[in-house]
Amino acid sequence: MTESVHLIEALDARVERRSERREFFKTALGAAAMTAAGATALSFSSSASAQTITDADVLNFALNLEYLEAQFYSYAAYGTGLDNSLLSGSGTQGAVRGGRQVNFTDPIVRQYAREIAQDEIAHVKFLRTALGSSAVAQPVIDVSVSPTSAFSLAAQAAGLVPAGTAFDPYATDEAFLLGAFIFEDVGVTAYKGAAPLLTSKAYLEAAAGLLAVEAYHAAIVRTTLYGKGIATPSLRTSADAISNARDSLDGTTDLDQGISPLSQTPINLSTTQAAVTTSNIVPLDANGVAFSRSASQVLNIVYLNKGAASAGGFYPNGMNGNIKTSIAAT
């Protein structure tokens, strides 16, 4: 039996144990969140408008993002999307455009896709349970393949494919990883940016747990891309180009970082330490802390529009909920 087969069996054996831990997480945090004072209003000055929002609004913003991730990974890993029972709620319910199963050739990437898909589906279920009747419906989500699809426009902006050319994130293992990289880091920075806006400790604890899982997912994607990029440098270059494209949408500040060592400026390192830097798996600031994005910056990226926008990109008709409009990136 090959080493890969042994690893796959070991990963499969973890599924049941993870499910048990996840059920505990959902029960404990879900119950606490349901009783928390989630209706306390606060100023959302870092968002698209100076509106007053609630904790539930913040979690619904996260739910919109989780719908996107769960649908993409579910289709890529299994060829099917979320169950219809997970799509209803307030606002206009929309369908998923596109999505299909990847014919993975690398068994490890296939296992990663399945693991992340299961986690993202669990996130949708958890947030919907915590929000109860306040949960928003899934909006229209575009994970299709055409020259004008969200994935293609993002890839064109990054220079992965020529203008007017389709990018297919379901074509190969490498294309899937690049597709995931387009928005995977965004979820981490979105949760970190939203955390200070939450007033309920129960909601904050839940958001911290979700952020940690999203950070693990981002690290999986970044590490795998970097590893494959050792043999195929163009793959690593493509990931760095996606990072630059994201940075062009969220403002003039250089926040985003690719996976190559030269994609970041060595900070607080001696000449010798900087010289031996070989990767940039974890994007950090000068203090070794992951950076944040405001809701408006996140919307600019997923809408693929650095101007004021209320729809576009991966959300053709916009998100559902009160946090759905961005301001022009500055």
Image: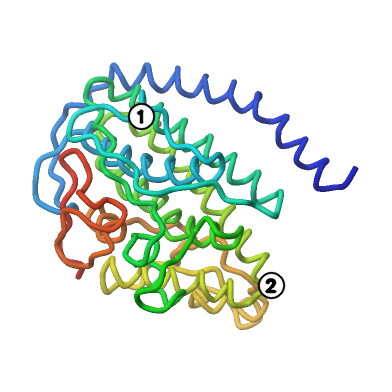
In the image, what residue occupies the spot 9% across and 45% down? Answer: 51
Q: What separation in Å lies between label 1 and label 2 (alpha carbons)?
A: 38 Å
Question: Where on the picture, by quarter, is residue 269?
Answer: bottom right
Q: Residues within 10 Å of mark 2 (few under 14, many from 20)?
A: few
Look at the picture and state if 261 lies above or below 29: below
Question: In the rendered picture of this protein, how many numbered marks are placed on residues?
Answer: 2
- Work out whether mark 1 precedes mark 2 in sequence or the reverse, and give the earlier one: 1
| Residue for badge 1 | 127
- Residue closer to the observer: 233 or 281: 233
Question: Where on the picture, by quarter, is residue 12?
Answer: top right
x and y percentages locating residue 58 in the rendered image: 25, 38
| Residue for badge 2 | 230
What is the three-letter code of the residue carrying label 1?
Leu
In the image, what residue occupies the spot 61% across and 58% down? Answer: 173
Secondary structure beneath label 1? helix
In the picture, measured across the screen, residue 7 lies left or right of residue 267, that is: right
In the image, what residue occupies the spot 49% across and 40% down? Answer: 74
Q: Are marks 1 and 2 in contact (CB under 8 Å)?
A: no
What is the three-letter code of the residue carrying label 2?
Ile
Q: Quadrant of the C terminus?
A: bottom left
Mark seen at residue 307: none
Look at the picture and state if 215 lies above or below 155: above
Question: Where on the picture, by quarter, is residue 128?
Answer: top left
- Residue closer to the observer: 314 or 229: 314
x and y percentages locating residue 19 in the rendered image: 58, 24
Name the image colouring: rainbow
In the picture, measured across the screen, residue 261 lies left or right of residue 181, that is: right
x and y percentages locating residue 221 in the rendered image: 56, 56
- Residue closer to the observer: 47 or 100: 100
In the image, what residue occupies the spot 49% across and 43% down? Answer: 75
x and y percentages locating residue 24 in the rendered image: 52, 19
